């Protein structure tokens, strides 16, 4: 253990705890002890404090006990003469630092000083339907502040399936803007989440990226927390909540939360620029989680492994890194970080002239930055993937039939058809839509290229910057060829891509594609739970929620919304020992509740004996468990004799007096809770949606966002259920936020649930 | 312009750097401020016809950053009689627990 680091970290911890205490006393004096302390959109109060101590901080007054706790963890600064093994003291002081830092952020929230104002900073949002959509509505000018629970869950599936291997908490400022951009681009290309905070001489990496026009926000995996080290606490709050959300752990289980992070959350701290006492102290806090620290300046190192899996603290002075340019040096620095944390990165080399990686998936190409678009208002684009015979497909053949866009004016539009033909011994016609849906993710991975929609409502934009770097239509083919081989190599042996701009051929293939879409729709509609002999399991989330098992049937997709029965079937073909295993139905024990012997046995075995039975069609009796990635939560409202369905995109209050984030804490973690379950939103449309309790007619309250975005599909369900005006009889956040309001609304509208058999 | 270097122990973290830079940049005749929380030092240039070093130091002191004055560390309770966490809450172990071993491993193989 380095005495220098121990001394600095312990001194920093002592100072920040006493500063937090002083700030708290002043705040209580000015605002009163009852002033609320709330981080935005989270059910985990102040998550680091909750994780370590179990204290649910809600007011300024509650913070006093946190400070007292932190003080107990402090130690005297090591003397200059007597050398001791300081690791324990340093780690304790690290925890005290984290508690104090989160308390400070809580006080700042109470004073309205968070998220931090950063003039000129625009963050990209989370979801949108048009690239020009909400840009005008964004006010901007603020850092992100803590990540909300909705986003944490939305990233959940990517964190567990390895698409997002971990996160990097970057503190400080890079040597140059070039180095800053290069560092985040390298991390983005590896799909590693980037959290930004801290400054050096008043300048933060956030400023550097802003100057270089790098888009920041949830969509690009770059989240600016604030310009001081204290805001780095949000990164550790994110880590703590990962354990609470997906690991089924509770506040106060400090040791388990730390171990969970050590083994399951692949994160590291990258300190850019000088390291002061507080940065050492915060780094000591991060070490508790098993997160190593890498600095680009000369600092003492802690090389033996232990608390972290590899080295604890690494110094890699930027000037000493080999490389001709700052960008090259930055690349080597990132490589070292990945080595030290042992992050498993899976990337596919795609031979295109722009950077490529999942982190670019959320990038927008606004009209002003656009060179050309395919589809949208002024043109049409479609994508069609079909299976063909081996001799019809020439592997690697990429053809553009028709003109390129050189003659189209800047900002113009043209028609484009993307025809992907694949051949493979294990390929099946049923996999066509599964593979076709991947085109969206594959194309979006290119920096400066944006893909929205699917089938014949595809909409692709190329940015001016991408085209200047040499990006052409044929590169879409290169991307698809490389990615289909890399990701689906076990079912796809040959891939050929034809890009069609020739008008006559375009119309011809558009017609053929539409016929195929129609045929697929009919096939999917015919696919029922009765028509198959086996369901599929999904245990992908067991790396995060060890006892959770999803059983996916044709009429019930995975609760994350990302895996339906066909996806699982394809996934099993790709990886026969992977998380999607066939589950033979076996003897039917109860056709109404959807209980089969096969799924029961599978769930018992794979939940490690914690779940004995599972009903596929019931929320009341042995409902399916949930990990934490669910799109919606369905919950019984006994007073209304029905259920409510809350979307994870809905931050508003529900009639049961809890928001989604609070409900999610009860529903997740692989626990079986009768009356409550996590579901995928498309399960609402299934005939088997809680059919044991009466199906969709039981829904008495539905998040408005679901009502609006799925109106047509839900209307069809209402008609199928024999109550065409049912959707208008279902309350939402605008019409009812309490049980009383809900009951009055249901009575007034004559909701069918009120006259159905008792749900209990 | 003349150069001034100040030792500011209270500037031990980067949120203080932001504050110190803000205070100094509001002073007339002060330019090119470099504040380092690692070195706890501020280097700046000032125009002696507008402002003097004592004025700069006084401004900093008023804002809670007195130059050349060590920051007192909080008084800690005496171990172990106080029942502090070090002695009472945290169990120190020297062997790896079975639970930890079970959690290890290449669980992300898929």
Image (cartoon, helix red, strand yellow):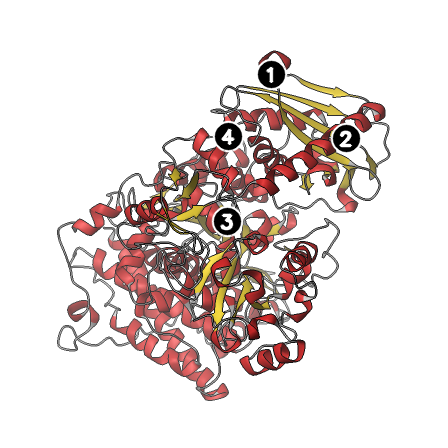
Residue A86: x %, y % from top left? 21, 57
Mark 1 or mark 2: whose residue is earlier in sequence: 1
Q: Nearer the viewer, mark 3 or mark 4?
A: 3
Q: CA distance from mark 3 to mark 1?
A: 32 Å
Q: Which mark is residue A556?
A: 3
Q: Which residue: 16% across, 56% down?
A: A83
The chain under label 3 reads: A
Q: Secondary structure at mark 4?
A: helix
Mark 1 or mark 4: whose residue is earlier in sequence: 1
Asked if residue A103 lies left or right of residue A633, the reply is left
Q: Are marks 3 and 1 on the same chain?
A: yes
Q: Which mark is residue A510?
A: 2
Residue topped by disc 4:
A487
Q: Which residue: 77% across, 30% down?
A: A510
Residue A516: x %, y % from top left? 69, 31
Q: Is residue A414 visible?
A: yes
Q: Secondary structure at mark 3?
A: loop
Task: Choose between A86 and A317: the one closer to the eye.
Answer: A86
Mark 3 or mark 4: whose residue is earlier in sequence: 4
Q: Secondary structure at mark 2?
A: helix
Q: CA distance from mark 2 to mark 4?
A: 27 Å
The chain under label 4 reads: A
Task: Choose between B45 and A598: the one closer to the eye.
Answer: A598
Local crowd size for mark 4, using a 10 Å CA cut-off: few (<14), some (14–19), many (≥20): some
Q: Secondary structure at mark 1?
A: loop
Q: Nearer the viewer, mark 3 or mark 1?
A: 3
């Amino acid at each position: 253990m380095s005495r220098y680091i121990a001394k600095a970290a312990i001194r920093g911890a002592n100072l920040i705890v006493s500063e937090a205490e002083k700030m708290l006393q002043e705040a209580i004096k000015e605002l009163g002890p009852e002033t609320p302390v709330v981080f935005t959109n989270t059910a985990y109060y102040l998550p680091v404090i909750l994780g370590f101590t179990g204290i649910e901080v809600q007011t300024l007054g509650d913070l006093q006990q946190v400070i007292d706790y932190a003080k107990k963890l402090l130690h005297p600064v090591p003397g200059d003469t007597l050398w001791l093994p300081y690791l324990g003291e340093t780690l304790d002081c690290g925890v005290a630092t984290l508690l104090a830092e989160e308390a400070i952020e809580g006080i700042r929230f109470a004073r309205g000083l968070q998220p931090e104002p950063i003039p000129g900073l625009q963050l990209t949002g989370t979801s949108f339907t048009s690239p020009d959509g909400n840009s005008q509505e964004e006010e901007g000018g603020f850092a992100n502040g803590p990540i909300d629970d909705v986003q944490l869950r939305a990233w959940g599936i990517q964190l567990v399936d390895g698409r997002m291997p971990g996160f990097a908490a970057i503190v400080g400022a890079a040597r140059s803007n070039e180095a800053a951009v290069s560092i985040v681009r390298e991390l983005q290309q590896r799909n590693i989440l980037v959290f930004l905070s801290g400054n050096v001489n008043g300048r933060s990496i956030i400023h550097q990226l802003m100057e270089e026009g790098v888009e920041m926000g949830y969509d690009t995996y770059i989240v600016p927390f604030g310009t001081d080290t204290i805001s780095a606490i949000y990164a550790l709050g994110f880590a703590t909540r990962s354990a609470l959300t997906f690991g089924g752990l509770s506040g106060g289980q400090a040791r388990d939360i730390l171990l969970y992070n050590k083994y399951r959350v692949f994160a590291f701290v990258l300190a850019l620029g000088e390291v002061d006492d507080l940065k050492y102290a915060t780094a000591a806090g991060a070490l508790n989680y098993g997160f190593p620290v890498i600095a680009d300046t000369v600092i003492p190192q802690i090389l033996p492994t232990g608390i972290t899996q590899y080295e604890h603290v690494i110094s890699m002075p930027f000037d000493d890194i080999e490389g001709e340019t700052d960008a090259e040096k930055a690349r080597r620095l990132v490589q070292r970080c990945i080595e030290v944390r042992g992050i498993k990165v899976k990337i596919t080399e795609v031979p295109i002239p722009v950077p490529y990686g999942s982190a670019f998936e959320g990038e927008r190409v606004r009209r002003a930055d656009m060179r050309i678009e395919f589809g949208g208002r002024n043109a049409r684009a479609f994508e069609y993937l079909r299976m063909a015979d081996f001799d019809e497909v020439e592997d690697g053949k990429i053809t553009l039939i028709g003109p390129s866009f050189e003659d189209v004016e800047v900002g113009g539009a043209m028609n484009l058809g993307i025809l992907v033909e694949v051949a493979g011994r294990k390929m099946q016609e049923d996999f066509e839509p599964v593979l076709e849906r991947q085109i969206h993710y594959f194309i979006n991975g290119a920096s400066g290229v944006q893909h929205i929609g699917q089938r014949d409502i595809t909409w692709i934009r190329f940015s001016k910057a991408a085209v200047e770097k040499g990006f052409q239509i044929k590169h879409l083919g290169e991307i698809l060829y490389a990615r289909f081989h890399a990701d689906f190599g076990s079912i796809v042996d040959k891939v050929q891509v034809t890009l069609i701009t020739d008008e006559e051929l375009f119309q011809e293939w558009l017609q053929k594609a539409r016929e195929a879409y129609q045929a697929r729709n009919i096939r999917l509609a015919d696919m029922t739970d009765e028509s198959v002999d086996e369901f599929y399991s999904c245990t992908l989330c067991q790396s995060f929620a060890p006892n959770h098992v999803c059983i996916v049937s044709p009429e019930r997709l995975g609760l994350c919304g990302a895996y339906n029965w066909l996806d699982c079937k394809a996934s099993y073909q790709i990886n026969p020992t992977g998380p999607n295993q066939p589950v033979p139905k076996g003897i039917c024990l109860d056709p109404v509740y959807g209980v089969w012997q096969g799924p029961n046995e599978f769930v018992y075995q794979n939940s490690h004996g914690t779940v004995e039975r599972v009903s596929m069609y019931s929320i009341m009796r042995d409902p399916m468990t949930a990990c934490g990635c669910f799109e919606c939560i369905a919950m019984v409202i006994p007073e209304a004799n029905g259920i409510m369905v809350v979307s994870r995109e809905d931050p508003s209050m529900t009639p049961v007096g809890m928001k989604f984030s609070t409900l999610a804490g009860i529903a997740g973690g692989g626990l079986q809770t009768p009356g409550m379950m996590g579901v995928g939103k498309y399960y609402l449309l299934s005939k088997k949606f809680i059919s044991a309790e009466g199906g969709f007619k039981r829904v008495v309250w539905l998040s408005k966002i679901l009502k609006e975005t799925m109106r047509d599909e839900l209307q069809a369900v209402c008609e199928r259920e024999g109550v065409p005006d049912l959707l208008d009889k279902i309350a939402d956040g605008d019409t009812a936020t309490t049980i009383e309001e809900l009951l009055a609304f249901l009575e007034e509208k004559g909701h069918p649930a009120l006259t159905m058999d008792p749900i209990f | 312009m003349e150069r001034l270097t100040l030792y500011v122990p209270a500037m031990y973290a980067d949120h203080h750097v932001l504050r110190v830079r803000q205070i100094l940049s509001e002073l007339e005749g002060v330019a090119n401020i470099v504040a380092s929380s690692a070195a706890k030092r501020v280097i700046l240039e000032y125009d002696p016809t507008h402002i003097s070093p004592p004025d700069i130091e006084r401004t900093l002191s008023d804002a809670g950053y007195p130059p050349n004055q060590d920051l007192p560390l909080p008084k800690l309770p005496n171990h172990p009689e106080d029942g502090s966490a070090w002695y009472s809450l945290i169990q120190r172990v020297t062997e790896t627990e079975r639970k930890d071993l079970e959690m290890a491993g290449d669980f992300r193989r898929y």
